[in-house]
Amino acid sequence: MAKELIRLSHVSMAFDGEVVLDDMNIYFNDKEFLTLLGPSGCGKTTTLRIVGGFLTPTSGDVFFDGVRINDVPPSKRQVNTVFQRYALFPHLNVYENVAFGLRLQRPKISEKETAARVGEMLETVSLRGFEHRTVTSLSGGQQQRVAIARALVMRPKVLLLDEPLGALDMRLRKDMQQELKRIQQQMEITFIYVTHDQEEALAMSDTVVVMNAGKIQQIGSPEDIYNEPKNAFVADFIGESNIVDGIMRADEVVEIFGRKFRCVDKGFAPDEEVDVVIRPEDVDIVPPEKGLLIGTVTSVTFKGMHYDIIVDFYGFKWLIETTDFCPVGERIGIDIVPEGFHIMKKSIYSGMFGDYSSYSEEYDEISDAEYVEEAANDGEVPE
Ligand SMILES: Nc1ncnc2c1ncn2[C@@H]1O[C@H](COP(=O)(O)OP(=O)(O)OP(=O)(O)O)[C@@H](O)[C@H]1O
Ligand SMILES: [Mg+2]
């Protein structure tokens, strides 16, 4: 059974009267990998600083193992932080950077124990043999590992990580994601991880907390968040989503564009207006005469594994992922299985997301520009 370790209860934070966290209620379990995910400025770092003890909330309480810790300083919390800028000591070698916190401990830790603990940590982050290297001679990924070892050597119960992979290139980022997950499982401690990258959040976490404008939008497993988004903000932020207005005509029957479709959702009021999410990969392309809806392809982008096509249905543009090539201008029909519809209650975010009109215009502009450039390179003059 998961055991609760940290709880934020009705936590709000304001700076100069401006509310940046609004009544956060959340708990973090022991040994859990939990990610705070949301756009820039939504309050992720502020939340982390409150857990770490660097900020005191304007109102509300922070509990650790059931004990209120609002007034406990960072050094007395069993929590350690890894920052995006690793903040290593440039004049110390790898070994001394990792040993730094241990040397400050009172009563003093023996040199023998220090060596054992530093060695064990360097092993964990795959940096054995790097003890005597200066940190300035290390790559970004290696420096990040030193920062993680330095935090973990103190044996915190909770590690806070604020966009720790932000400075790394894509390939290294992916490797370090796996690496961090492995370290967290091996050390059996709680990781509270901050990112604005939804793919990273889905790949690494046991639990994802989606935030926007200082408010929690949804808490759940990566699968829950992706498959059952609570509102249009979450649906749009996590992956690609077509979001259209619908009406629940009965249990398991939703109407969009004046047509009734079978879905798997129920429990809505009769004729309740809803937001309907259809993921681009859940749409099947069929001949127009067999289609439940018929639309016109307005743009095609090759993505390697598939094509992204934009299709105009009655003036509303959808993004569809397909392995079949459909040229611009083609009339296509679509079919969607009942599980392909996800029904959400109307929210303050209704109507704000999920229409790909602007996406396709942007894309058209880019491809036009490319065409002009290519033509110019070929010595042709575009019309
Ligand atoms: N010390 C401060 N004084 C005033 N405003 C602050 C302070 N710290 C944070 N804020 C404001 O609080 C809001 C949330 O900031 P926070 O750093 O938590 O966002 P974030 O989700 O971590 O964003 P990012 O992804 O850009 O790091 C922002 O509007 C920010 O300007
Ligand atoms: Mg931040």
Image: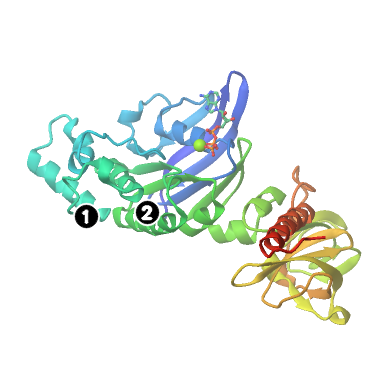
Disc 2 on helix, strand or loop? helix
Residue shown at the point (62%, 19%) measured from the top left: 17
**Callout 1: helix, strand or loop?**
helix
Label 2 crowd (10 A; few <14 / some 14-19 / many >=20) = some
CA gap, disc 1 to disc 2? 14 Å
Q: Position of residue 220 (x, y in %)?
A: 56, 53
Labelled disc at residue 180: 2
Residue 63 location, quadrant: top left
Query: Residue drawn at (26%, 34%), measured in percent from left and top?
Result: 89
**Residue 145 shows in this picture:** yes
What percent of the width, then of the height, locates residue 126? 25, 56
**Left or right: residue 79 compared with residue 26:** left
Q: In the image, is 312 to the left or to the right of 69?
A: right
- Residue kind at label 2, given as amino acid type: Leu
In the image, residue 256 above or below residue 56: below
Q: Nearer the viewer, residue 191 or 326?
A: 326
In which of the image's four quarters is ligand 1 placed? top right
Q: Which residue occupies 32% across, 37% down?
A: 78
Q: Is residue 337 visible?
A: no
Q: Residue 267 lies in what quarter of the image?
A: bottom right
- The x, y position of residue 139, in whole percent, is 32, 48
Q: Position of residue 250 (x, y in %)?
A: 84, 65
- Picture layout, residue 331 above or below residue 70: below
Q: Amino acid at mark 1?
A: Glu
Q: How many marks?
A: 2
Q: Earlier in the sequence, mark 1 or mark 2?
A: 1
As drawn, the residue found furthest toward the top would be 16
User: Which residue occupies the foreground of this view, 309 or 280?
Assistant: 309
| Disc number for residue 123 | 1
Classify residue 299 by image quadrant: bottom right
Quadrant of the drawing holding the C terminus: bottom right
